[in-house]
Image: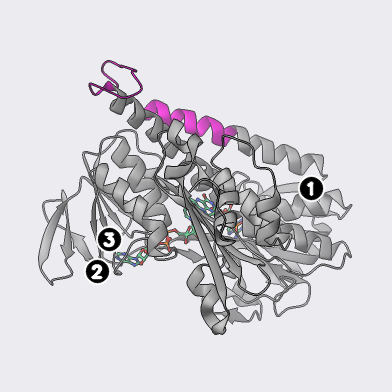
């Protein structure tokens, strides 16, 4: 096979890698991208997109089940709802397939060459790719490492059989009667809620004292309430110990030190993800590490000249939109533009029921360092649109500097608030003050009015509460 020479080689076609390659191609950089899987990475194939498809299907099903119960307040009645999970999964796979083709098409349109196979560095400028037809050598002036992350496996609950990773949970063809979820973080609660809505009896086993430790307890409270309504048992300060010999239960040590059997036809292990730092010839390089992650600077440069790293392999937060923003920036740097990481915030969204959004600093984070702050909160119970959607649980909260009202953080919990993350991010990135948000006409009736009202309330003159 003839060697390839290029200006840029991207290893990994996840959201970080494919965005880097598309942008580089647009800028006329001679670019090659390598992946042994379909383009889109974890996010598109087994992460963000498939999980949100399943969450949506579960939400629709649960609504119909609820309507089938006598006396639904909307006056809608439904007979005998049923869910065919195999069909749901086929629908989800269809979306993933369309997006795989879409990403491949975008790469081609940008003039990027796609090589299918597993890449490994031979040295800082040469990479060997194991393809179906043999070894392909690629020499590149610049290489971007975008190899992503993989689920953490617990030694006493190895993946396989009844023990599922998120990837396997997203491919189930039937809803398990009982599901134990080990790890009450993002994936555990997003997928745990979806399976509870589809009819599984779900137990969440979390090692620390609370679920979703990334978000403050006030934001998580409505989620816990809803989990209770869905019949989900949440065990905190609890340690999973392994499968019970019978194969249909998980052994758990409770906070009180008791050993209990949690019924579990399936066990979903979601205790975090680890960067993929092996399998691509790291041993041939001299890269500085930052714990388990590849160390990068504000331009995503590693400790080796001409080698960049982006996305999950470089650290927290392991989110697709961070990877994409890094990818875009690195492509522009390689094309000769002056760029450095200058983002004011990286939005975090948890697609639970209700959803949680956090952009910028929480009140506690903002108070650190002795900064004086003001905060204001507006409940959706006082929002007309929320009432018409039967979605009154939750609120929007604004955190600002006390002296000049610069907005430092915005959080929300409520139905569909993921879509508000755009307005929140824009406000912080543009350096908005409370008066700016209060002065924008927010369309009525929308949940977004809660944002304006939270700013008004922080200023001491909310109108609708
Ligand atoms: P990845 O998407 O992991 O892509 C890395 C790619 O590199 C893979 O395609 C892999 O095959 C390839 N690769 C690895 N080694 C090699 C090699 N040697 N040669 C060639 N190719 C290689 N994030 C969000 O922001 N929002 C969400 O809603 C969300 N939901 C998620 C739900 C689930 C269930 C999971 C698991 C994750 C979710 N994430 C979400 C996280 C998100 O998927 C990641 O942050 C994102 O995919 C990281 O992008 P990346 O480009 O760094 O790596
Ligand atoms: P996570 O870090 O969100 O949560 C892991 C949870 O498991 C934590 O609460 C932790 O305390 C707990 N834990 C750790 N070890 C444990 C043990 N032995 N027993 C019981 N509990 C244990 O990790 P995740 O849910 O696996 O998700 C991985 C990453 O994927 C996230 O951190 C996030 O970056 C990304 N993700 C993002 C989204 C989103 O943006 N909506 C959705 C899914 C995943």
Residue 444, quarter of picture: top right
Label 3: few (<14), some (14–19) or many (≥20) C-alpha neighbours in 10 Å: some
Residue 341 placement, left or right of 63:
right
Residue beneath disc 3? 157
Instruction: Return the residue at label 2.
Output: 237
Q: Splitting the image into 4 quarters, where does residue 448 fall?
A: top right
- Secondary element under disc 1, as helix, strand or loop, is loop
Residue 251 to residue 196: above or below? below
Marks 1 and 2 in Cβ contact (< 8 Å): no
> What residue is shown with label 1?
112
Which comes sooner in the sequence, label 1 or label 2? 1
* Residue displayed at 25% across by 48% down: 228
Residue 219 highlighted magenta (yes or no): no
Depth order, front residue of 24/211? 211
Q: Is residue 108 left or right of residue 364?
A: right
Q: Residue at x 81, y 54 (%)?
A: 24
- What's the magenta region? 68-97
Q: Residue furthest bottom?
A: 369
> Under tag 2, what secondary structure?
loop
Instruction: Please tell me which of labels 1 and 3 falls first in the chain.
Output: 1
Disc 1 and disc 3: Cα gap in Å? 41 Å
Q: Position of residue 282 (x, y in %)?
A: 61, 73
Whether residue 65 is visible to the viewer of this picture, yes or no, is: yes
Chain-order first, disc 3 or disc 2: 3
């Amino acid at each position: 096979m003839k060697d390839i020479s290029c200006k840029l080689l991207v290893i990994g076609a996840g959201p970080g890698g494919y965005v880097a390659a598309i942008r580089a191609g647009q800028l006329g950089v001679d670019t090659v991208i390598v992946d042994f899987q379909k383009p889109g990475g974890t996010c598109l194939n087994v992460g963000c997109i498939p999980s949100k498809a399943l969450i949506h299907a579960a939400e629709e099903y649960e609504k119909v089940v609820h309507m089938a119960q006598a006396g639904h307040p909307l006056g809608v009645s439904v007979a005998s709802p049923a869910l065919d999970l195999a069909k749901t999964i086929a629908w989800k796979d269809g979306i993933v397939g369309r997006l795989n083709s879409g990403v491949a098409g975008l790469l081609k349109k940008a003039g990027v060459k796609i090589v299918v196979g597993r890449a490994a560095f031979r040295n800082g400028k040469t990479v060997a790719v194991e393809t179906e037809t043999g070894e392909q050598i690629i020499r590149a002036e610049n290489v971007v490492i975008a190899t992503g992350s993989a689920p953490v496996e617990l030694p006493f609950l190895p993946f396989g059989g009844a023990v599922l990773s998120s990837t396997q949970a997203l491919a189930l063809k039937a809803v398990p009667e009982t599901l134990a979820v080990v790890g009450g973080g993002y994936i555990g609660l997003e997928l745990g809620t979806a399976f509870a809505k589809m009819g599984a009896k779900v137990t969440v086993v979390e090692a620390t004292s609370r679920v979703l430790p990334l978000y403050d307890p006030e934001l998580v409270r409505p989620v816990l309430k809803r989990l209770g309504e869905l019949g989900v048992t949440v065990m905190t300060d609890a340690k999973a110990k392994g499968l019970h010999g019978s194969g249909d239960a998980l052994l758990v040590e409770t906070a009180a030190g008791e050993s209990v059997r949690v019924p579990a036809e399936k066990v979903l292990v979601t205790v975090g993800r680890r960067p993929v730092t092996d399998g691509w010839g790291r041993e041939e390089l001299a890269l500085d590490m930052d714990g388990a992650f590849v160390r990068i600077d504000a331009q995503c440069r590693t400790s080796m000249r001409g080698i960049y790293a982006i996305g999950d392999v470089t650290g927290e937060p392991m989110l697709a939109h961070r990877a994409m923003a890094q990818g875009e920036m690195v492509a522009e740097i390689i094309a000769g533009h002056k760029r450095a990481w200058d983002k004011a915030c990286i939005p975090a969204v948890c697609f639970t029921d209700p959803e949680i959004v956090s952009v910028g600093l929480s009140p506690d984070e903002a108070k650190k360092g002795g900064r004086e702050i003001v905060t204001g909160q507006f409940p959706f119970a006082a929002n007309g649109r929320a009432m018409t959607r039967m979605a009154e649980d939750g609120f929007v909260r604004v955190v600002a500097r006390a002296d000049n009202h610069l907005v430092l953080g915005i959080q929300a919990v409520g139905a569909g608030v993921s879509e508000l993350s755009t307005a929140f991010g824009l406000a912080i990135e543009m350096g908005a003050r409370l008066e700016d948000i209060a002065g924008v006409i927010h369309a009525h009736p929308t949940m977004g009015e809660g944002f304006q009202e939270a700013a008004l309330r922080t200023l001491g003159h909310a109108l609708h509460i």
